[in-house]
Image: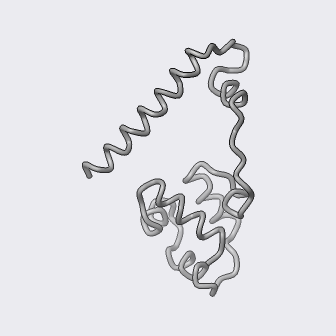
């Protein structure tokens, strides 16, 4: 199995779905990914990789095996607050608490399904 396929499987696992669900939701043929996993197909097209990357909100580079580089805190603050606002520790901690709340709520939704 390729690193790309392993990363796709891991992303599915993190999302609480399987490859078939991801394929159905993206319009990608399940057979193409099965052939890729089994080595009968050596590569995935740029179109397929782009659809998968967009679905999981990752880059194609990540799918292809680029190392994961954690976003630095300052870049996140700029993205979340527009860059021209001073972000206090209290503001930043509130954002992190809210993100944790959303994560817990989503995990709770999976359990009730």
Vertically, is 62 above or below 80? below
- In the image, farthest residue toward the left: 112
- In the image, farthest residue toward the bottom: 40
Q: Is residue 97 shown left or right of residue 64?
A: left
Q: Position of residue 14 (x, y in %)?
A: 48, 55
Vertically, is 68 above or below 7? above
Q: Quadrant of residue 91?
A: top right
The quadrant the N terminus occupies is bottom right
Vertically, is 108 above or below 38? above
Q: Residue at x 62, y 56 (%)?
A: 53
Q: Position of residue 62 (x, y in %)?
A: 69, 57
Vertically, is 106 above or below 73? below
Q: Looking at the picture, tell me which residue is in the foreground, 46 or 7.
A: 7
Q: Is residue 69 shown left or right of residue 28?
A: right
Q: Quadrant of residue 43?
A: bottom right
Q: Residue at x 28, y 50 (%)?
A: 111
Q: Position of residue 97 (x, y in %)?
A: 47, 27
């Amino acid at each position: 199995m390729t690193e790309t396929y392993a990363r796709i499987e891991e992303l599915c696992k993190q999302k609480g779905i399987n490859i078939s669900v991801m394929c159905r939701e993206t319009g990608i043929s399940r057979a193409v990914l099965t052939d890729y996993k089994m080595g009968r197909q050596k590569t995935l097209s740029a179109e397929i990789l782009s659809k998968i990357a967009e679905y999981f909100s990752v880059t194609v580079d990540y799918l292809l095996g680029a190392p994961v580089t954690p976003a630095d805190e300052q870049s996140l603050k700029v993205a979340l607050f527009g860059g021209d606002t001073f972000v206090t520790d209290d503001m930043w901690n509130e954002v992190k608490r809210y993100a944790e709340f959303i994560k817990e709520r989503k995990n709770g939704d999976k359990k009730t399904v």
